[in-house]
Amino acid sequence: MTTESLPRLTHLDLALDDGVLLVSIDRADKRNAINDTLIESLNTLFSQPPEGAKVAVLTGHGDHFSAGLDLAEHGLREPLEVMRHSQYWHATFQQMEFGGLPVVAALHGAVIGGGLELAMTAHVRVADPSTFYQLPEGRRGIFVGGGASVRVSRVIGADRTREMMLTGRRYSAEDGQRPGLSHRLAEPGAALTMARQLALEIAANAPASNYMMINALARIENMPMTEGLFSESLAAEQAQTRDRARGGVPAWHDERAA
């Protein structure tokens, strides 16, 4: 599939090259704030990734990755409407995290509120020095609804997440990397280049291995040891009996022996 034949999705700019699908949020005039239409586009894209896409690189046009929820759409809703709205975000982000397509995020500028929740769906996060993180919902009289209480807490801990939410604390790129909000800190202006390179390396992995690393680890983490080890064995069996693995292991040994 060529870039010209990629689906046209509102608020997303797509490009495909060497198996790497570049997904750029295209609302720079709104600091890439997340509205319902953008969530629908992400859901559509990651529910059925384009043919030939092996890894996605997620970024945002303009000066910011995403400034979070588009407050222009934050109108009065009935209680069930609020829950369903939150659950649709959850379903979309679950699809991004566990759909089988590895996601590398190239972060810059604001990564706050819903933007941080979106970033945390990525399996690898690369930050530009301009990046800053925040969960300001408490200051706005609302509560997180896109998964921060789970995904952010899973990475930096519930205690640190609670303090972040209560105080509206802002983490710089460097401060955010220490607890794990990003995995790599790039040179100024180089986050997207680094993310592309990492994506190419991930794309070279066996698809079954990538799928298991995405899906098995998150589940094993929450299992008792015995069940976790058994599940690891099942994942190993699935990955290592594929044709790619049968050829890859001997080749790896030959390479090491050379």
Image: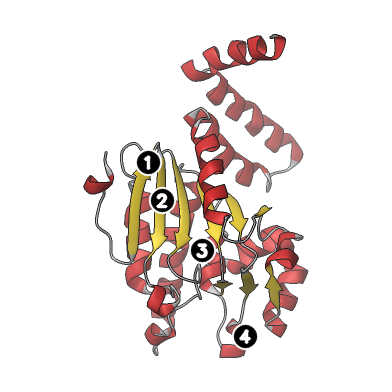
Q: Is residue 171 above or below residue 231?
A: below
User: Residue at the location (37% across, 83% down)?
Assistant: 73
63 or 159: nearer the viewer: 63
Name the image quarter holding the C terminus: top right
User: Residue at the location (50% across, 38% down)?
Assistant: 200
Q: Which residue is mark 4?
A: 138
Indicate which label's residue lies in the foreground, 3 or 1: 1
Rate crowding at label 3 as few (under 14), some (14 to 19) or many (20 or more) other CA atoms within 10 Å. many
Q: Earlier in the sequence, mark 3 or mark 2?
A: 2
Three-letter amino acid code at disc 4? Gly
Q: CA distance from mark 3 to mark 2?
A: 15 Å
Three-letter amino acid code at disc 3? Leu
Identify the element where label 2 is drawn.
strand
Measured as percent of width and height from the top left, residue 251 is found at 59, 12
Measured as percent of width and height from the top left, residue 100 is found at 46, 41
237 or 78: nearer the viewer: 237
The mark found on residue 17 in the picture is 1
Q: CA distance from mark 1 to mark 2?
A: 8 Å
Instruction: Check contact, mark 4 vs mark 1: CB within 8 A.
Output: no
Instruction: Check contact, mark 1 vs mark 2: CB within 8 A.
Output: yes
Q: How many marks?
A: 4
